[in-house]
Amino acid sequence: MIYTGRLAPSPTGYLHLGHALTFSTAHERACDAGGRLLFRMEDLDPKRCSDAFARAAIEDLRWMGFDWSSEPVFQSQRRNLYLENWRRLKEAGLIYPCRRSRREISSLAPHEEDPVFPVEWRATPEEAASFHEPGGVNWRFRVPDLESLSFMDQNFGPVEKTTLRDFGDFLVWNRDDIPAYELAVVVDDSAMGITEVVRGADLLTSTARQILLYRALGATPPAWFHCRLVCDAEGRRLAKRTGGLALRDLRAQGLAPAQVLELAKKSLA
């Protein structure tokens, strides 16, 4: 099997040091394996994504010296594929409509970043059956009770997450009629034949969620390589709103790509 990796930026802001290091790792692993690297623009949310950021991402990645083996795939043009898989999950009784707000869920555990969704709030199969389209409500995947999900990460080693303890029922479609991250990436990585996903360590729990989706959709999960996170001077994980560390800002300061990567490595968590 030919190694197939991917670069998958989200055009919600300018790429920063953390993206440079993660995408550099993805590029290096594809080259070392004699494989190929595909490009996908994760531009599902029209409120947060912009064409300007998409163009900037491609320009920044080219400047860093990365190349890819395909024309860019845009998630915003693949709705029918996501909808087909939403229907498969609904018909299998694995997802349900949810009208609970993020504020309601957060109020249950205000000090937790991602509280476990209460099983008492699950909708009935009859409620799900009454919907023919996903829009207007959130849709959640019903996780099994206290199942341990284990996977081998190519960087961190064995990882184990337990349902209803480390994470609960998760979004696969949101009320704005947009596929959620978990569903979209599973559908795309499977359809594109991705054999290894390289991304940040903040998505280790997402990997466990996605393993459940792969299983539900009868697909084979890829291998996983999660990169350590790059932090700012205060030790906080970089975000796109972090000023001064965007790739184009560093380029404007006269840094070369190699210097950008060296700076990123010095800022690892």
Image (spheres, rainbow, N blue to C red):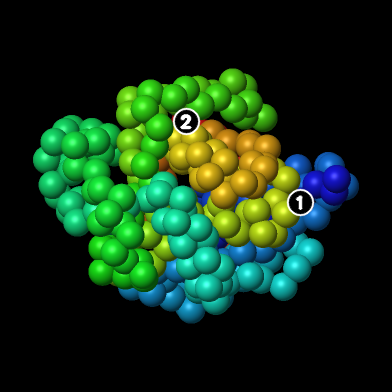
Residue 16 lies left or right of residue 46; in this view the side is right
Q: Which residue is mark 2?
A: 269
Q: Position of residue 5 (x, y in %)?
A: 71, 51
**Residue on which the image places disc 1:** 4
Residue 118 visible in the shown view: yes
User: Label 1: how many residues lie within 10 Å, few (<14), some (14-19) or many (20+)?
Assistant: many
Q: Amino acid at mark 1?
A: Thr
Question: Viewer-proximal residue, 94 or 186?
Answer: 94
- Give me the residue at 59% from left, 21% from top: 158
Residue 52 spot, x, y in % from top left: 48, 78
The quadrant holding residue 38 is bottom right
Q: In which quadrant will I find the N terminus?
A: top right
Q: Pointer 2: residues within 10 angstroms few (<14), some, or many (20+)? A: few
Q: Which mark is residue 54?
A: none
Q: Residue at x 31, y 57 (%)?
A: 128
Residue in the picture at 40% in, 32% down: 144
Sequence-first tag of 2 and 1: 1
Q: Nearer the viewer, mark 2 or mark 1?
A: 1
